[in-house]
Amino acid sequence: MSLLWKRRHLLLAALLVACGVVHAAQPNYLPPWNPPPTRGVSFAVPPFDAIADLHGDIVDPQLTVFFAGNQFMVVHDLVEAFKQHHPQYQRVFVETLPPGILAKQIETGSLVMGNLRIALKPDIFTNGKGSITELQKQHDWFADTVDYARNPLAILVAKGNPKHVESLKDLGRADVRVSMPNPQWEGIAKQIEAGYRKAGGDALDRTIMDNKVKDGSTYLTRIHHRESPLRVLQGESDAVPVWSTEAYFQQQVLHRPVETITIPAEQNVTATYTAARMKDAPHEQASKDFLTFMASAEAQAIYRKYGFQSSQP
């Protein structure tokens, strides 16, 4: 290669970089984050073919669990531990979609995701304690229940906190882009809005959930609140209210470049999570065994590993 050609080549490369045509490799923050099942052909092309909220064996499962979506990070360790204690159950299927979507799936009898239709009935359904109580009043779905974890709220920001967010009030600022769970199917949205009203009254809630939604500076999630940390990592949102465990998972487990802003107790809300055994559970004994396991010391330890609090205050 001639010296002149080398110079032309280097000049062209410099121009491409200067014009933004060539970008440095960006970190891949996209889910799924759980270890994939072993055996079989692995084919995942995020974000087009990457199923993050369906876990395990969908064909002839011996246990089916519908988990509230914010517990996605716990599923792998929890299910593996359950299998160790109960080796008779090796085909376990778990969904970690928003609980509002899971409840509709139970009501309608199926879920359609892309070109896939899933008509499995759950053996276990987990949700916030209040939601479980309300669903029981409406539908009388559950045979028995057990509380197994608690979780307060937190604010997640990019490392260095470039917008200097210190409290929920700052989410009402015009220069702070917010990502909020969609109230249509996310129970956490009600909890966060309660925090807004504690921090700044109805005016703060209207600012964030009405005015800023209209002007585009508040984004309402399309899937579930797991989108919010991803938007911070990708530079699309500045501050996102999330369950503290989601902030913990991104910062302490995945070591992502984010920081957690603590919400003071007087403005915070702590959810209690309840596992409910379905009256029409297709696998009655498996459902009983899993409900018992959720209250065990080992299951509690797994939840604490991912930042959840004990079910007892």
Image (cartoon, helix red, strand yellow):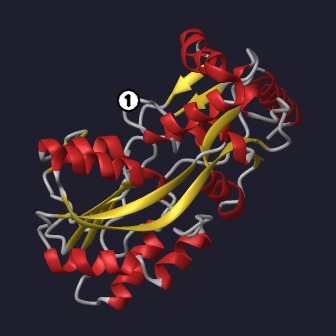
Can you tell which quarter of the image residue 276 is in?
A: bottom left
Q: What residue sits 83% from the left and 38% below the top? A: 161
Rendered view: 72 above or below 168: below
Rendered view: 65 above or below 263: below
Q: What residue sits 36% from the left and 58% below the top? A: 67
Left or right: 148 in relation to 126 = right
Report the quarter where the N terminus lies. Answer: top right
User: Label 1 is placed on what type of residue?
Assistant: Gln
**Front residue of this view, candidates 106 and 87:** 106
Secondary structure, mark 1, is: loop
Left or right: 127 in relation to 29 = left
Report the quarter where the C terminus lies. Answer: bottom right
Can you tell which quarter of the image residue 6 is in?
A: top right
Tell me, yes or no, if residue 291 can be seen here: yes
Q: Position of residue 123 (x, y in %)?
A: 21, 66
Left or right: 277 in relation to 298 = left
**Front residue of this view, candidates 63 and 27:** 63
Rendered view: 209 above or below 80: above
Q: Position of residue 305 (x, y in %)?
A: 61, 72
Q: Position of residue 296 (x, y in %)?
A: 44, 82
Residue position for label 1: 184
